[in-house]
Amino acid sequence: MKYIITESRLNNLILDWIDNFNLKLVDYPSYYRILFSKEGNPIITYDKRNGYVSVSYLKIGEYLHSLFNLDREQMEEIIKIWLETRYNLEPRFVDFR
């Protein structure tokens, strides 16, 4: 059976999926790090000076691609939306490493 999901519903589903990771925002002088609470490993780094965002492909990107069939551009956009809505940050550029 196939289901048709609107883009906005899919975005909300993905945002909720990311929220379920129980992430923790840590504030440093020139950047923020978003960590897995259990492991303490950074999965996202946000540079306060220029809005540059570095995202771990292995920790988040690979799952966004395989579970939701997102391409790199879509993954970058969903990370921007997530940072804006959940942390009130203003990402300018997202890079998966």
Image (cartoon, rainbow, N blue to C red):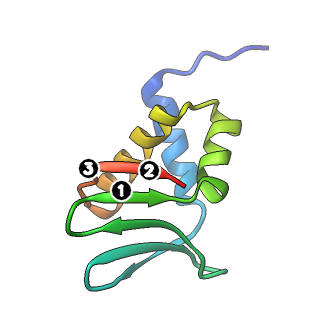
* Location of residue 67 (image quadrant): top right
Q: Which residue is mark 3?
A: 92
Which mark lies nearer to you, 2 or 1?
Answer: 2
Tags 2 and 1 touching, CB below 8 Å: no
> What crowding class fits label 2: few (fewer than 14 Cα within 10 Å), some (14-19), or many (20 or more)?
some
Q: Name the amino acid type tagged 3.
A: Arg
Q: Which residue is mark 1?
A: 83
* Location of residue 69 (image quadrant): top right
> What crowding class fits label 3: few (fewer than 14 Cα within 10 Å), some (14-19), or many (20 or more)?
few
Q: Earlier in the sequence, mark 3 or mark 1?
A: 1
Q: Left or right of 29: which side holds 72? A: right
* Location of residue 65 (image quadrant): top right
The answer for how far apart the CA atoms under marks 2 and 3 are is 10 Å
> What crowding class fits label 1: few (fewer than 14 Cα within 10 Å), some (14-19), or many (20 or more)?
some
Which quadrant is home to the C terminus?
bottom right
Which quadrant is home to the N terminus?
top right
Viewer-side residue, 80 vs 8: 80
**13 is higher (above) or lower (below) than 51:** above
Q: Name the amino acid type tagged 1.
A: Leu
Q: Which residue is mark 2?
A: 95
Tags 2 and 3 touching, CB below 8 Å: no
Q: Which mark is residue 65?
A: none
Residue at 31 percent across and 58 percent down: it is 52
Q: Position of residue 18 (x, y in %)?
A: 55, 54
SS assignment at label 1: helix
Q: Left or right of 82: which side holds 89? A: left
